[in-house]
Amino acid sequence: MFNPFIRIAGWQAFGLGLVFVIGMGVIGTFSNVSFNGALDAHFVQHMTFSSSFTLLAIDLSSLVLVMWITGLILSKVFRFIDILGTMTLAKAPLLIIAFAGYFNKTIFQNTMPANPLEMFQSVTFLVIMIISLFSMIWSIALMYNAFKISCDVKGSRLTIAFIIALVVSEAVSQLVIYKLM
Amino acid sequence: MLPANCPSCHSTLKVKCLKCENCQTEVTGLYDLPVLALLSTEDQQFILRFVINSGSLKEMASELKLSYPTVRNMLNEIINKLKKDEE
């Protein structure tokens, strides 16, 4: 559940991960979920196919690129395809957030209520929030193991490098989204 | 499996005596164990499979039903152990 990369990596993981990412793009378009950042998912009022897939492409590219550069700094020998494949598959749990968007009828990113506490009065929203949080943590745990297995980095070096790389990839994706969209 | 460590203090064992089964001659001394014999049974099995598979990590991954980086990491660990033993 948290480390499928012991058995699957490379092109196989990329193919499977791509199915999930395409699913996120399609379902996210209909359920109005925007994956606008390497670590972001927001409920919006309107979503189009083009923006959904462009955002996903930016998220994934930023994540893979930053993890690959971090891998080059820390590891001697590793394959780019393993980083690409495992990181793509690590996005799979976010498909749950795309589905959760169907049930969100209350809160949207650009229409936040005057009193944010109103959000917590909706049981549906609370359930969606908990499920989304779990999906995000699951995805991050997968990314951690993807980086660990693909680059063979261990110990505190792994944890520190992964946290920095994740934050940088989020920043890069936000910057690219800001510049392009 | 040849024991490589002392069961009492866990230090590396040495070979004290070798015997010819044909003429019963015994050669006594203090010889180092081969580096590969210092590895665990699993690691020795891994090296054996690796050689049989012509050193192909892809073949190994397919045989062990593990991913390519997992098998490569296992090999890296053995390399590190061998380097440590060599020092």
Image (tube, coloured by chain):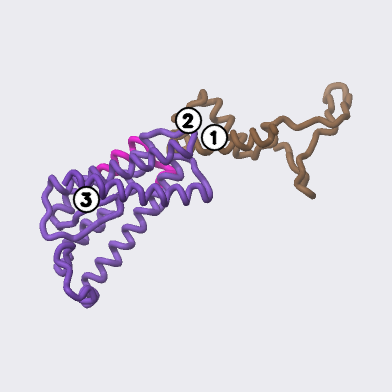
Q: Residue drawn at (83%, 29%), measured in percent from left and top? A: B18
Quarter of the image that includes the C terminus of chain B: top right
Rendering coords of residue A145 (x, y %): 43, 48
Q: Which mark is residue A102?
A: none
Chain A, chosen colour in render: purple
Structural distance between the alpha carbons of marks 1 and 3 = 36 Å
Disc 1 vs disc 3: Cβ atoms closer than 8 Å? no
Residue A11 within the magenta-colored segment of the rendering: yes
Residue type at numbered disc 1: Leu
Disc 2 vs disc 1: Cβ atoms closer than 8 Å? yes
Secondary structure predominantly adopted by residues drawn in magenta: helix
Q: Which chain is brown?
A: B
Q: Give residue A106's quadrant in the image.
A: bottom left
User: Dot 2 corresponds to which residue?
Assistant: B57
Rendering coords of residue A15 (x, y %): 29, 39
Depth check: B41 or A20 in front?
A20
Q: Residue drawn at (24%, 56%), measured in percent from left and top? A: A41
Rendering coords of residue B60 (x, y %): 48, 32
Depth check: A115 or A34 in front?
A115
Structural distance between the alpha carbons of marks 2 and 1 = 9 Å
Q: Earlier in the sequence, mark 2 or mark 1?
A: 2
Residue A154 within the magenta-colored segment of the rendering: no
Q: What span is colored magenta in the figure? A: A4-19
Q: Which mark is residue A24?
A: 3
The reply to whether residue A161 is visible in this rendering is yes
